[in-house]
Image (cartoon, grey):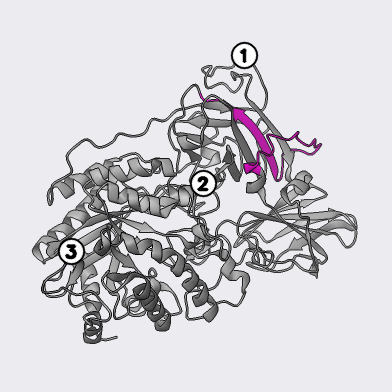
Amino acid sequence: KGAVGLEEGLQSPSTAPLLQASPPARSFQLDYEENCFRKDGVPFRYISGSIHYARVPRPAWRVRLLKMYMSGLSAVQVYVPWNYHEPLPGIYDFAGDRDVEAFLDLTAELGLLVILRPGPYICAEWEMGGLPAWLLWKPDIVLRSSDPAYLAAVDSWLHVLLPKIKPRLYQHGGNIISVQVENEYGSYYACDYGYLRHLLGSFRALLGSEVPLFTTDSTRAEELRCGTLPGLYATIDFGPGSNVTEAFGAQRWVEPKGPLVNSEYYTGWLDYWGAAHASTSSRLVAQGLEEMLQLGASVNMQVVSWYMFHGGTNFGYWSGADFKDQYKPVTTSYDYDAPISEAGDPTEKLFAIRTVISKFQPLPVGPMPPATPKHAYGWVALHKVSACPEGCAAPAWHCPAALSPSLSLQYANLLDVLDVLCPSGPIQSQFPLTFEAIKQAHGFVVYRTQLPRDVLDPATLGAPPHSVCDRGYVMLQQEYQGTLERDGQTMLHVTGKAGDTLDVLLENMGRISFGANTSDFKGLLGNLSLDSSPLSNWLIYPLDIDTVIQQGWPHTALPKSSSKGREGPAFYAGTFETPGIAWDTFVKFPGWSKGQLWINGFNLGRYWPRRGPQQTLFVPSSVLHVGRPNNITVLELEGAPPTPLLFFLDRPLFNRTLSHSTAATE
């Protein structure tokens, strides 16, 4: 695609907002002559930062946005995850934490402009990149393409979302100055210009001709070729350590005129389960910012957007995964080593950035809001013990035995409560069905069959490569046998009798959000076999765990007795009370393996201390009760410690593994 043709396309009155001779009272426009943005006719440079409202509890929106404003940012970048708002076709949710209009109105109230990124694909290390899992109910759908089935779903969604956005555009008195179309499309294999043209037409039809529309891609020539389109202003992304002049030279290859824009300047990086905690030095980040702003001062106008300025948390099942030669699921924490921490606190990096910004523009008057108070609530344990046993050297508030009588923890094996978790009963099928085939978006599904013959000598229970998506917890006669894993262990050795019950609990660890060219189906994608003989006649139980926990289970029901041990999938329930206050806290899992945590029915996400690096889960104060018990529910998947303890502390722990972190108080 030639630069001349692109420039002509960008300057066509029918496709892009241009500088007018007499701009209206409120306008935000691209100026191709002076290579800048113009706000109300005046040259304008913004410094913005990303925040994801879906990763921040609504009660914390205001203070975290205020910290961004007080850092010297003039704008925020906001993704809209489609799957967060349309859980089922035609069923929409914009209430509570999902009230994107309330979030946008709050940004305006605080004096922040908005760069909106509504997708429909957003990446963001979010489940399936923001695309709804129900799109995969049509197994042969081609995502992010001109596939008619995909475009029909996109159009339906945009006709719901974009009318909420249009009144908030800057030209209409709002604070949204520009809107991104798709996201890093050049990295996707399809390279479907028809798809991008369709989106451009839809966005223009629903938002009007004035708002600047743009794309974002890396600086690689191939990605800029496939990710850009005449009528969409092309911007780039890169991080600290990049050659700024070379990076913006790549933008100039597709945009000979107009402002230089880095839409994602990386302040840190994400964490994957099983990898080291990512960090980027404050000095390097601040140095890169200063270099860019100095370039902007000498070469007309340039703007920068921080990704992330505040990361937040992948609550529930919302964390996505990358595919880089193998499946790499993202941790629950989305701290990102960002200037504002996962818990919403200013960091050293924030103040380094703020110092650089102050060299180029005045900072807002007033103090930076401080870190939110944190509280170490201590232990929640199995037994009600009133005194520390003789010989316990720990301080009383650290001692597992020095507990309030109101504390308790009890458990029930998951297989004992299938009637509660799957009240509609199982689906019968000769062979396993995927999550998508049974319309299960997230969480867990049990696959049950029987051994077809006596197995006196150990036989191999195996799965085809890449067919366990993503982890399968195997039980035979309710005895835990081990775990099958995508890109990992795919066989176990078992013995048993004909008719013995074989159960496999399948866990969806998050659909791929970046790096794969195929749809990421979940569950058993191929059949299990016993010594190469396929197993058949399956009962498939889609589990609705979140609904029953939100309704009060298991705290409102008597636990079912079980004679089994503490290995394999089981629920643990307990309570604790706050000492007259509800402050943010972090919960640690000493000796636990892997699972999911709920407090007061709120799904705080996955824990996996055995794999790391994340060792604690963030518990926002907004989910806690004051003056009445807080209900804790844990689904442990592989095995709880002999004495199942949780420990609430006042700081997060990263980059630890179980072998290096056996003391719950460290």
Q: Quadrant of residue 75?
A: bottom left
When the figure is inspected, residue 588 is found, relative to residue 390, above or below; the finding is below
Q: Label 3 is placed on what type of residue?
A: Gln
Q: Label 1 is placed on what type of residue?
A: Ala
**Mark 3 against mark 2, which lies toward the viewer?**
3
Q: Would residue 97 be visible to someone looking at this image?
A: yes
Q: Secondary structure at mark 2?
A: loop
The numbered disc on residue 612 is: 2
Tell me, yes or no, whether the two marked residues, 1 and 3, touch with CB atoms within 8 Å: no
Q: Earlier in the sequence, mark 3 or mark 2?
A: 3
Q: Nearer the viewer, residue 423 or 315?
A: 423
> Which residue bears the numbered disc 3?
302
Q: Secondary structure at mark 3?
A: strand
Q: Residue at x 23, y 65 (%)?
A: 261
Q: Badge 2, how many Cα within 10 Å: few under 14, some, many 20+?
A: many
User: In the visual, does 33 lie left or right of 335?
Assistant: left
**Mark 1 against mark 2, which lies toward the viewer?**
1
Where is residue 46 drawn, in percent x and y? 20, 58
The numbered disc on residue 342 is: none
When the figure is inspected, residue 300 is found, relative to residue 510, above or below; the finding is below
Q: Earlier in the sequence, mark 1 or mark 3?
A: 3
Q: Looking at the figure, which quarter contains the N terminus?
A: bottom left
Q: Label 2 is placed on what type of residue?
A: Gly
Predominant secondary structure, magenta span: loop
Q: Residue at x 54, y 30 (%)?
A: 647
Could you tell me how far apart the alpha carbons at marks 3 and 2 are, in whole angstroms? 39 Å
Could you tell me how far apart the alpha carbons at marks 1 and 2 are, in whole angstroms? 33 Å
